[in-house]
Structure formats: structure tokens, C-alpha cells
Image (cartoon, rainbow, N blue to C red):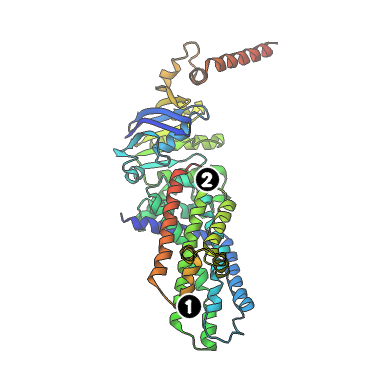
Amino acid sequence: MLTVKNLKKSFGSFVAVKGVSFEVKKGEVLGFLGPNGAGKSTTMRMITGFLSPTDGTAEICGHDILKDPVAAKACLGYLPENAPSYRAMTVTDFLTFIGRIRGYAGAELKRRVDDVIERTSLGSVRHQTIETLSKGYRQRTSFAQAILHDPSVLIMDEPTDGLDPNQKFAVRQMIKAMASEKAIIVSTHILEEVDAVCTRCVIIAHGEVVAQGTPDELRAKDPQGGRLDVVFRNLTLSKEEQQEAARLADQNTKKEAK
Amino acid sequence: MCPCKQVKTIFRREFKSYFDSPVAYVFLVAFLVLVGFLTFGMTRFYENRQANLMPFFFWHPWVYLLLVPAVTMGTWAEERRNGTIELLLTLPVTLTQCLLGKFLAAWAFIGVALALTFPVVLTTYWLGNPDGGAILCGYVGSYLMAGAAVAIGVFASALSRSQMISFVVSLAFCFFLMIIGFDPVVNAVAAWGVPAGIVDAVSQCSLLTHFDSMRRGVLDLYDIGYYIGVMVFMLAAAQVVTENRKAA
């Protein structure tokens, strides 16, 4: 449902993304992993049509994001980083605005908004302005915005960032509940998320894909312990940085032993 | 789906957002107080003993100069600062639809302010027997000029994420477009010995020159075309700037 073809992006002489390709099928939840600054957000912004790529393209439900952006965006739900929304609007007004832009009107619009408020448990705050909400509710409002039109492709940029453990759990349950009918991408740098929701992972570092596979396949890359964080470090750090990390870990173990 | 429906949706949200904060009411009061004070206090509307709105319209460009940038400075700068630009531009709308919706909303808001000056018209009708056509023409001219200033403001707002910068840029831009047609300045430049043809050509680019005839009650297609031209040009420029600096 989503095909990413050799996306590249440079800002001046700085190359942020150096040719990223992958595919997400219906029923898959793809974990998009990488350290901060690896190019995760830039890649997602290109897939969603916010940034225009220097080279390459993406196809959403068969619509090329460069050639037919409006049709591609219509099939897409996007939760940007930090969950931006119009803070002076109430939750209901905000979702109604999004619904209208998505082409709904009248009874259908009202039904969609009520339904999504129900699904994301926003009922108790629906008449409050977004600026008065806690971070968890704000995140959920943004989540509601992304799934209001029941998109075939859902892209979320760090959906659990800054949430408390209960809220993280709730977001993951919502993702799981939708997983079977959609193609979903979740970017994150929280590795526990991978086991919680993802069926497959792509790891990027320095703007390139360094590994992809199921969580178990990735774990197999650390023959000793089978730990994801070790695999992640080995893939995303340079040789010197790896040695430095190993030295620090070693020091700490010795201290603890004393 | 009709593309104008998207423009309408964005227009509605933007227009309503002006009234979400007290700023809108502060603005409306400031506009009316300023226009009222300048008309009655500075140009001695009553003492003229003439039933026309020339002294009233005379001040409109200068009031717009100060207040239009205040209305438009947030149009894109605020979207950038809050990150909502990423949300808006990943919805199934084109950038042109967003721009048009925002522009029309700001212009309509200025329209509300302008419409609220109606007591001046009523006063004139009550005191004398003014030329209704000339008044209408003055209002049309004033509103068109406001539209040009709004388009400049929307462009300036697209330049940066700081509302302050976009305010200053659009104020400076509008001020420049005004003084090149401001009579004292034009006369001074002509007195330096600059050829009349050049002076005239430059002052034809001014927001003021084209308003002058309209506030006297002369409605000319050439003047209307000028204002529409400025709007189209500035909105096209805003489109290019926004397209190139989305993530900035």
C-alpha cells in the first residue's frame, strides 16, 4: 500500500537522507527506528508530501506523492512530531475542520467526528480548547485527526513521545486495534515499542537504511544476548563510538563490582 | 470535489480564529478610534462644512499601514511556530487553496472593520446631501487598497516564523509603496530635476496614487486592475516563498 522509492533529501551541502527505500503492506506495522538526527522525520515528511524530495518518490495506495499529491494525501493519515494542532480551537471544532477538509459534510461529518472522539476517549474534553488540555489529551486529539477518515495508510512520528506509561499503553493498544486493516508506520527511538506493536522494522542511521527485518531477525544479529539495544548500537554507531560505549559500560560494571 | 470548497473550509477556520482571541476586538476598536480621531480631529471633518467623505478616506491608507500588518502577521508565521503548517500541508489541499483561504479571511476581517465605519456615512447623510456614488466608490477603493496591503502582509508572513519580523517587513513594504506616490515626496523628487516621465512611472506603482482618484469618486478600471495585479503578484510570491521554505 505504501512504497518508498529511493528517497533523497539534501539541505544545501548537507545530505539528510541518502536514498531510502522500503515497502509497507496491509496489516503490517513498520517500526521506523534510528537515533535522533538519523533522518527519520525528514523521510516521513517526504512520504507525507510536506517536503519535496531531492530525488526519488513515494507511492501511497498507487498515487504518486509528487504527481498526484492531493489523491495520495487523501489516503493518508499523519500524526506529525509533537502533535501540532490549532490550540485556540475546541477538540470538536478542530476535528470538524479536519473532517470538512477531508470532504465530509452534514450528518456524515458529525458521525465521523463523534465516532473518532469515542474511539480515542476524548468525550470528556470535547468542548475544551486544545491549549487547556494535558499533553496526553493533546496527543490523542492529534491521533484522532489522523484516523478520522479511516485512512489505508497511517504514519506516526514518535506517537508516544513524552507520554506517561499508561498513555503509552493506550496509544499502543489503539495502534494494534487498527493494525489488521491498514499499513502503518511508527517512527520511534524507544526500543520497547518495537516488541509492543511492530511486525517489522527498518533501522536508519546517517540517512541510510542499515537493517530491516522482523524484531526476531534483528535480535539474531546479537548472537550473545539477543538484545535489541545492542543490535541498535552496533548498527547506528561508528566503530570509535562503539568502543567508547563499550569502555563506559565496562567502567560502570567495575564500579558496581567494587 | 470542488476545489473552492477547500478554500471555503480554510477561510471559515481562519476567519473564526480571529475572533477566538480578544485581539480581534482590540483591533476593531483601535481601527475605529484611529479613523475617527484622524477624520474628526486632524482633518476637521465638521469644520469643512462639506458633505463628502474626502477627509475620511484620506486617512485610510495610513491606518491600514499600521493595522493590516498586525492582522496578517500571523497567517503563516503562527503556523510555522506551532508546527501546524506540517499538519495543514499534509491534508488533501493544495498550497494555493490554503493561501487563498488565508488571504480572503484576513481581507474579510478588514472588511468587517471597514463596514463598522458606517456611522460616518450616516452622519454625513444626516447633516447634508452627499453624493452616494462617490461614497461607494471611496469604499470600494479603500477595500481594494486594503486587499493589496493584506496580500503584501501574507507574503511577509510567509518569510519567517517570527510574527514581529513579518509585521516590520510588511509595514516597511507598504510604507515604501505608499511614499513613492505621496504628493510631498513626489514633488520633492521632481524638484531635484528627475525627468517627469520617470517620476510619473514610479508613482504609478504606488498604492496611494490609485486610491486618490477613487476617493474623489472616480472609478477607473485601470486602478482596479492595479490593485488586483498587486494582490495576484504578492500571493504568487507568497506561494513561491512558502513552497521553498516549508520546513524553515
Report the residue at 58% width, 63% height from top: B66
Residue A176 at what x, y percent from top left?
41, 34
- Answer whether residue A90 is visible to the viewer in this image: no
Chain ID of residue with mark 2 = A
Residue B193 at what x, y percent from top left?
54, 64
Helix, strand or loop at disc 1?
loop
Report the residue at 39% width, 69% height from top: B222
- As drawn, the label of residue A79 is none
Helix, strand or loop at disc 2?
helix
Residue B240 at what x, y percent from top left?
43, 48
The residue under label 2 is A138
Of A140 and A185, nearer the camera is A185
Callout 1, which amino acid? Arg
Of B208 and A152, nearer the camera is B208
Q: Are marks 1 and 2 on the same chain?
A: no
Callout 2, which amino acid? Arg
Report the residue at 46% width, 35% height from top: A42
- Answer whether residue B8 is visible to the viewer in this image: yes
Report the residue at 49% width, 28% height from top: A38
The residue under label 1 is B216
- Taking A85 as reference, is B207 above or below it? below
Label 2, residues with CA under 10 Å away: few <14, some 14-19, many ≥20: many
